[in-house]
Amino acid sequence: MFSLNLDKQSDTRSELVENKYSEQVQAAVTEISQALLGKEHQIRLALCCLFSGGHLLVEDLPGMGKTTLSYALARALGLDYNRVQFTSDLLPADILGISIFDQNTSQFSFHPGPIFNQVVLADEINRSTPKTQSALLEAMEERQVTVEGETRKLPEPFFVIATQNPVNLAGTYPLPESQLDRFLMRLRLGYPDQRAERELLEMDTEWDKVENVKQCLQVEDVTEFRRQSATITASGSLLDYVQRLIAFTRGKDEFHFGLSPRGSLALMRAAKTWALMCGRNHVIPEDVQTILPAVVEHRLRAVSDEDGHTGASLVQRMLSEVDILE
Amino acid sequence: MRSEIDYQIPRSALSWVLLAVMLVVAPQALRMPLWISAIAVACIVWRWLIYAGRLGYPGRSLRIAIVIFTLLVSVSQMRNLGIGLDSAASLLTLGFVFKLIEMRHKRDIYVVISLCFVMLMVAFLYSQSAVSSAYIALSVLVTTTAMVALNRSTLLDNHSGTFSLSLKMGLQALPLAVVLFLVFPRIAPLWAVPVQNNGAGTGVTDEMSPGDIAQLGRSSELAFRVQFENSPPPLHENLYWRGLVLDDFDGVTWRRTRRGSSYAQAASLNDFQWSWEDRVRLSDDVIDYNVIMEPTQQPWLYGLHLADPMNRELFQSRNFEIFNNGLITKRMSYDLRSYRGSRTDLLLLDSVRRRSLELPTGGNSQSRALAQRLRADTDSDLDYIYAVLARFQQNEYFYTLNPPLLGDNRVDDFLFNTMAGFCEHYASSFAFLMRAAGIPARVVVGYQGAEYNRYEDYMMVYQYNAHAWNEVWLEGRGWVRFDPTAAVSPERIEQGVEAALADDPAFLEQSLFSRSRLGAMDWINTLRLRLDAIEYEWNRRVVNYDEEVQFELFERLLGEVTEEKVVLLFASLAVIMVAGIAVAIIWTEPRTRRTPVDRLYLQLGRELDKIGLGRQRGEAPNDYCRRVCEARPDLAPLVQEITELYLELNYRHADLQASRQRQLQSRLRSVLRQLRFRLMPVLKSQG
């Protein structure tokens, strides 16, 4: 069930308008696809997440290309990249950094941790203790870290890609809902299709391909995307639709709890970015429907849920039962 | 091996199904042999273990073995019990519980659930009392819950929610059930279920030998309930529920003289010679009452002397016994009018006199001698009767349920040796003494006494009220009732058998929680009377609601009942119900205010729906447009333009200028018109 891809595929979408933005996105997607074969839609969603200024949670079984995606993403956008492998004995200081006494200057000097990078890959985030998890998540929300009383800004853009194994594997600390909510999107990569798999098998190693990924966007482009997406038009009809979607999750028996305002804001933000990425200056229902599973799945939970994986079927219900017009 | 993944029944659905099965089988278990219940429990446990992954489904050979076993069982059951409800019910139960362990797919569960309902109907065949009806209603509710649980999204997994949903459904169905109960035509059954009488020997029989009624004294089962209409109930000592008249004595047993082979034939026998009015001198002391009798598997009924049945299907015999036309296999209600103190048979036919004086030729010489001696000492028949009663009263006679065994000359033995007996001993010997002295006498069996239920104002007569007394024919007075037991134990008649036998350990020994044992505890007694009151009301209002009562209801509703009126009633009820549902639907449907643009766009979906391309719920405009264009490329330009206009109108601008909006809207309308034109079937066939 885990790697079944329930997402709407964007291959068939024609509402793409050729302009600067859509071309840039297409270039980046093509570039990253060299490393991660046959996952164009997921790459697009990851880009959308990044351009929306949100953080990404990739959840899948080991070996599905989670790390590859994040590394390729950082390379294509020309961002600093660092990877933190989360283990059960990882401490907050290992991520944030630590002050060390310098004999020469007779002062404490701060040694920034791996979090001071533009793209941080938090690998297997659910293997570390809640304490370490929350250190990272705090940094994600505030975009700054406070170590020994001194607050330090994190670089711009700041983008965390956390990966996690399905929580029902042994030795994990599942993220609570409050922390899941901090991630703008949760993606599942899923198994590659037959063609991509064949191509993969024909290659020597996967890592070489990642090295081949060339930078095709500048940091300024990322900022530009973020700035532009705020100007995208969302008409009254569209907002009605989004409100109906949100209302559907609230006060229903099946839903353990409804979408939070943070969730609905995230939905709107991602939908606008997606519209921009498609080269449009207005949001249409398709945009909302495309990003809905990634944005909403991890925030929803059915009443009968025990391990947090009923979001997908709930989202399918939202899509099929909430009409785009009343 | 099949490679398909087995359907996994949701845990909640399975638990509800198994609970329903348990509830459904439980009432059958009371009637079936113990080993069938054991099999049922084993199957339920087995099914649960299958769910838990501890056991597998039965293999092919095992299933064949089970089928053969079931067939063998059913054959042997039919041989033992005969072809009837019991054997059929146990066969059904066996098949039902075996179905559980091969309950693999969803359809199997539906079969099991349907069988649950069938089993509940079988339970209804056995008992329709208020308690069992309540139990069955609960079982129906649980079975419905199982069905709900099976179809409820697995995302919802709380038992109370599932149960409350089924409760809601049950309550919604209730008004319909009530209406159908009241007005649905009652059709006389085309066939009757042969309910086998397992507990043979409940109630009074048409033979009486010493010990028969004493046996009934040990049972606290209900015999019948009586409600007096517009008059207070008679005193306890006058409550002689007359059953049968026994006038044939062979030295041991009193029997009813049968003319013809069946009771039905007795109805047609017309040896009255005089009409009813001639034989009876009616008194003015009239009392009306209704009796609801428990099934006895016998045809006769009970009433106070002299009872005149108000129901058509009842008739009186020549001894003024009351008979039903057929055996009483289910609870039966009948109305009687009694003329108390009426005199019967002021003139005695010779044949009847002969029969009422007949005694076996030999034996019981002591008693015969006693009769001769006493009669010689007294002046009249009446004095003689009093002398005999005085003898019972003044000597050391005991009233007991456990009389000593009697020898060959039973009457002698009782009168002179043991001097202890139950009512039948006294009645039997009293009648013997009368006949030996040449006075026509006979034994009457029935019930004496009753318990008053103040909550619903009716009386309950139990099996332990069974009694035997005598009727003696006296010149000028006809048949007169004498009760020798009253001479021995006056409290039996005045206060009831409980008072008379309170110290007798044999009294009610068959019932653990007998009323007299619990009677000491006041609140339990209250509870018992209340429960019985509910049961009584249930029987009167629900179980006895038959064609006749229904007709009365129609009459009250419609005045004169005609076919048109009944049809009209049905039709109007149907209309009211459908209209009610429609109003409810319209009421609960949220009213939407659609913009003109939305209305136009929805019209596109409706138009295309005619060619099978309607828009699905939640389908976005571009997705829909693409689907339609793929299916009907010829419509592509129009549909694309509509979609484009719709997107422009609805999504492209935060707010659109009014003039531009009007312009686009009229364009949308005109394109839609074109589309409708294209879709017109006439043009299509031409094109």
Image (tube, rainbow, N blue to C red):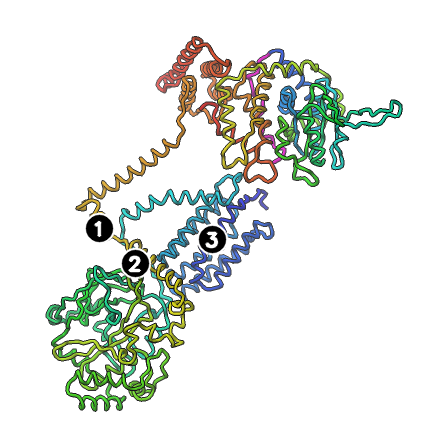
Are discs 1 and 2 located on one and the same chain?
Answer: yes
Q: Amino acid at mark 1?
A: Glu
- Letter of the chain that mark 2 sits on in the rendering: B
Q: Quadrant of the C terminus of chain A?
A: top left
Sequence-first tag of 1 and 2:
2
What is the crowding at mark 2: few (fewer than 14 residues within 10 Å), some, or many (at least 20)?
Answer: some
Foreground: B114 or B533?
B533
Give the SS element for disc 2: loop
Asked if residue A11 is among those painted magenta in the image, a careful observer would answer yes
Are discs 1 and 3 located on one and the same chain?
Answer: yes
Q: Where does label 2 land, which residue? A: B456
Sequence-first tag of 2 and 3:
3
Residue A160's spot in the image, x, y percent?
69, 25
Give the SS element for disc 1: helix
- Letter of the chain that mark 1 sits on in the rendering: B
* Residue range of the region highlighted in magenta in the rendering: A1-18
